[in-house]
Each structure stands twice: as C-alpha cells, then as structure tokens.
Image: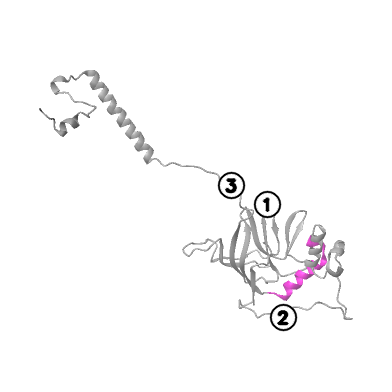
Amino acid sequence: MYRRSFFERFKNLDLFPKYVETASVKTEIGAFLTLLSYMFLILLFMNELFLFLTLKLETNLTIDDSRIHNQVAVHFNITFPRLSCKLLHIDALDHSGARHLNIKHDIFTIPLDRKGNRKEHHKPKKLDKLGNGRFFCGSCYDAEEFSQDGCCNTCKEIETAYRKKGLSFNANDFEICDKNLKKEMKYEKDDGCIIYGTLHVNKIAGIFHIAPGVNSIYEDQHYHIYETKDDEKKIDCSHYIDYLYFGKAFSETLYPLSNTKQEDKAKGKI
C-alpha cells in the first residue's frame, strides 16, 4: 500500500490551495481591484508616516492644591553699603492675604562701616531715663490697655499695641516714629549692612522686599515710612546681590539675579 510522506500530509493543512497557471484566468476587474488595493495600502502608509513625524502638543492645566501646607525657600545674600542694619527690615506678602512683617527668623545681618569693613559687635543700648532716675513712660495713645506697663517708648511698641487692639496703625500720625527713624539715621550715618538668610513663603503669587524705615498697615494697605521731617540726608538704596535663588541650589544652574549690582541714582526714593 502507498503511504504518503509527512510533507504530503502536511500540505493538507493549507487553507489557500494553489492552482496551476493553465487553470487561472486574469481579468480586467481583477487588475482594477489589485490596483485599488495597492493605492489603499500606499494611502494608509503615508497617513501613518505623517502622524508619526508630526509633533503632538498637549495642554494640561493642573492646580496645585498643596500650596497651603507646602512652602518654597528663598535664599539670599545682599549688601547695602549705605544703609544701616537698624533701618532695614524684610516683609513678605502673598495673594492669599498673608502678611509677614519684620521677618527675623533665619535672617542675619552684619553691620559694615563706611569703608565696607565688618564692624565689631556693639553693646546693647540702655533704656532712656529721666533726670530724676525714673524710667520714661511714653503714651500709647488709644491702645494703652494693650501695652506692657501702659508705656510705649518706641514706634514699634505703639504699633504692637495698636495691632493687639485691632486698630489701623499709620506711622505718620506719631511723632515718636519720626524721631526714632531720624535718630537711627543720624547715629548710623554712612554705615552699611550685609543681610542674608532664608525666607519660607507660600507657593502662590506674592512679593517680598527688603526696605528701610518703618512698615505700616493703614486701611488694609501696606506702607513704608522712610523719610523724616527736616532730614537733609537722602537714603541710598544701592545694593549688591551676592546670590538670590529659590528652592534647592544646583551647582550648574545660573541664577539671573546673583552677582548683580544696582546703583540708586535717585537718592531718597525706593
């Protein structure tokens, strides 16, 4: 008995049997369908190639809802060659309504003399006394019940008492504020200051500034009182920024504000 080989039995699995060339017939309809198939394949190929080579831009809007608990660090080192450390203070404000005035945490100052050299530490000032040996007790005006011992001898003590009582404070309304600022300007004439440190602010739009004088909140607006009456000396806000950057520092990153200098040509203006 004839036994088929393995390859012959394997051919039975072919679902597309081939016919001999003498049994096949070529028609015009077949040629048309073949041409149409080739055109369709070329069209699909060109379309996929175009999609592959075309840049796809996607726009996503993400709201950072963690800004309340997350803060960004602002690192800075700025030299004011003609402004005393006693005149400078740092304020930070943002669009959420948060105000941080006279920031002192993680902020350091180095006093300079008129030649730009670092000064030695001065002894703390003593309280002013009257001639008969009694301590002077200044008025707190409308906020005496919110002051310590009912006395306000400095502009800052008056401001603190007004804040506790919830009253608007305007430094221009108090003569002692003008006297304190004028005294400090005269005492530290031509002295300079290096101020450096780190601020921690909320991750939302806002501002921070280093300014001379006395800050004030009046009718929910932020003011700076830095000019004194009958003062002939104009404040020179010229400064040099050694470095100023946000967040972590990277060795190969260039910070545009670092190593920049600003001359104050219009003395007495900020």
Name the disc covering residue 96, or none: 1
Q: Give the residue displayed 36% in from the left and 37% down from the top.
A: 50
Kind of residue at disc 2:
Lys
* In this view, 56 is above or below 103: above
Q: Give the residue displayed 80% in from the left and 67% down from the top.
A: 157
Residue 182 pos. (x, y %): 76, 70
Residue 11 pos. (x, y %): 19, 30
Q: Do the residues under discs 1 and 3 have CB atoms within 8 angstroms?
A: no
Q: Quadrant of the C terminus?
A: bottom right
Name the disc covering residue 63, or none: 3
The mark lying in front, picked from 1 and 2, is 1
Kind of residue at disc 3:
Ile
Kind of residue at disc 1:
Ser
Q: Give whichever of 196, 199 is nearer the camera.
A: 199
* In this view, 87 is above or below 30: below
Q: Give the residue displayed 81% in from the left and 68% down from the top.
A: 176
Question: In the picture, residue 14 is in which quadrant?
Answer: top left
Q: Give whichever of 197, 70 is nearer the camera.
A: 70
Residue 207 pos. (x, y %): 64, 57
Residue topped by disc 2: 123
Boundaries of the magenta span:
170-189
Give yes or no for residue 188 being in the magenta stretch. yes
Question: Is residue 229 at least partly visible in the picture?
Answer: no
Q: Earlier in the sequence, mark 1 or mark 3?
A: 3
| Secondary-structure class at tag 2 | loop
